[in-house]
Image (cartoon, rainbow, N blue to C red):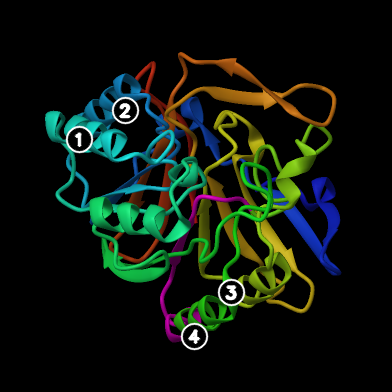
């Protein structure tokens, strides 16, 4: 864990927040230790956005590590959310070995077309088989919760993108309370929490990533009460080589241990800081994601993977 002296403090919706980058082990450090024994595994990717060649490479890389219990795509499965793009996506999945279970969170790119919001959501649910934009299931012996917007983006293709709403927030609060005895509860969101992982925190952060959620104060308050939460988010496309690819988030009034937040990487195009409080595309050739190892004793190891080079980037055991 990064020493607390590197802690950054910020305010979101009146809440005082503390963020501690976790870093984890580099590939060289991880290689010097025995790899954690896994009773089950999960694969997590995000931000495909039509890059089917890199998706195929990612699936092949992950399959070579051994078959996982499930594949989670944390949003932006497609570029504009058309039927043809979903067909192409699932055609690519069919052409490559992957887990039988494919789970998904709703992203903003699923809504980048002229159809009504209800039609966009219906198409997402039809192709993914998810029961709703927010739901829970179990995989690899752990509870998995998915959250997503229940209303169209307020400003179209500009943030904020997500309105959770009172019903979803109440559901999330109850679901997390019901799983308080679990070692970990995995929460999947396409969109990012302010001041957490790469792109949202530090002196080179892109300032617009502090406003993805309309009801971010309520969301952070709920998450902050549950130190067993591991919150996975995509959307930024920032490099998993960074120390802030994973972090502890402590919320004022919440559990002082905080909860964990992890960047899921990207399939389509790496972005990074532009030096002016924004971001810029760095490379269309890069592609990164995660493999999660669940141990017999409940320990969870998150491995970030470089799909272009087929290698481990970092390893973090929680």
How crowded pointer 1 is (Cα within 10 Å; few <14, some 14-19, many 20+) is rated as some
Q: Is residue 146 above or below residue 292?
A: below
Camera-near label (1 vs 3) is 3
Residue range highlighted in magenta: 176-192
Residue at mark 2 to residue at mark 4: CA–CA distance = 35 Å
The numbered dot on residue 165 is 3
| Cα separation between marks 2 and 3 | 32 Å
Find residue 226 and report its image quarter: bottom right
Residue 137, position as x, y percentages in the image: 30, 69
Q: Return the residue at label 4.
A: 174
Q: Is residue 71 magenta?
A: no
The Cα–Cα distance between marks 1 and 4, rounded to whole angstroms, is: 34 Å
Disc 1: which residue:
93
Task: Name which quarter of the figure residue 294 lies in.
Answer: bottom left
Q: Are marks 1 and 2 in contact (CB under 8 Å)?
A: yes
Residue highlighted by disc 2: 55
Upstream in sequence: badge 4 or badge 3: 3
At numbered mark 4, what does the secondary structure look like: helix, strand or loop? helix
Comes first in the chain, label 1 or label 3: 1
Which dot, 4 or 3, sits closer to the camera?
3
| Left or right: where 197 falls relative to 276 | left
């Amino acid at each position: 864990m990064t020493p607390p002296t590197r802690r950054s403090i910020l305010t979101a919706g009146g809440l005082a927040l503390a963020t501690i980058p976790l870093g984890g082990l580099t590939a060289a450090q991880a290689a010097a230790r025995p790899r954690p024994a896994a009773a089950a595994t999960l694969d997590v990717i995000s931000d495909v956005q039509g890059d089917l060649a890199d998706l195929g490479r990612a699936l092949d890389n992950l399959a070579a590590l051994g078959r996982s219990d499930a594949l989670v795509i944390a949003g932006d499965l497609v570029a504009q959310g058309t039927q043809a793009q979903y067909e192409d996506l699932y055609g690519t999945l069919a052409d490559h070995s992957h887990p039988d279970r494919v789970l998904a969170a709703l992203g903003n790119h699923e809504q980048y077309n002229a159809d009504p919001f209800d039609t966009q959501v219906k198409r997402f649910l039809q192709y993914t088989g998810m029961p709703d934009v927010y739901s829970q299931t179990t995989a690899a012996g752990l509870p998995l919760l998915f959250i997503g917007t229940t209303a169209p983006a307020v400003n179209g293709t500009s943030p904020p993108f997500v309105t959770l709403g009172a019903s979803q927030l109440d559901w999330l609060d109850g679901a997390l309370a019901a799983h308080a005895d679990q070692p970990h509860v995995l929460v999947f969101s396409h969109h990012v929490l302010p001041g957490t992982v790469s792109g949202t925190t530090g002196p080179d952060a892109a300032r617009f990533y502090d406003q993805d959620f309309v009801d971010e104060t309520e969301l952070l308050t709920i998450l902050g009460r549950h130190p067993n939460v591991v919150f996975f988010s995509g959307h930024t496309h920032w490099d998993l080589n960074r120390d802030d690819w994973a972090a502890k988030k402590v919320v004022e009034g919440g559990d002082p241990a905080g909860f964990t937040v992890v960047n899921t990487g990207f399939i389509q195009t790496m972005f990074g800081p532009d030096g002016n409080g924004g971001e810029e595309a760095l490379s269309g050739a890069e592609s990164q994601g995660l493999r999660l190892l669940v141990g017999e004793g409940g320990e969870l190891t998150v491995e970030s993977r470089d799909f272009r080079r087929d290698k481990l980037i970092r390893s973090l055991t929680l």
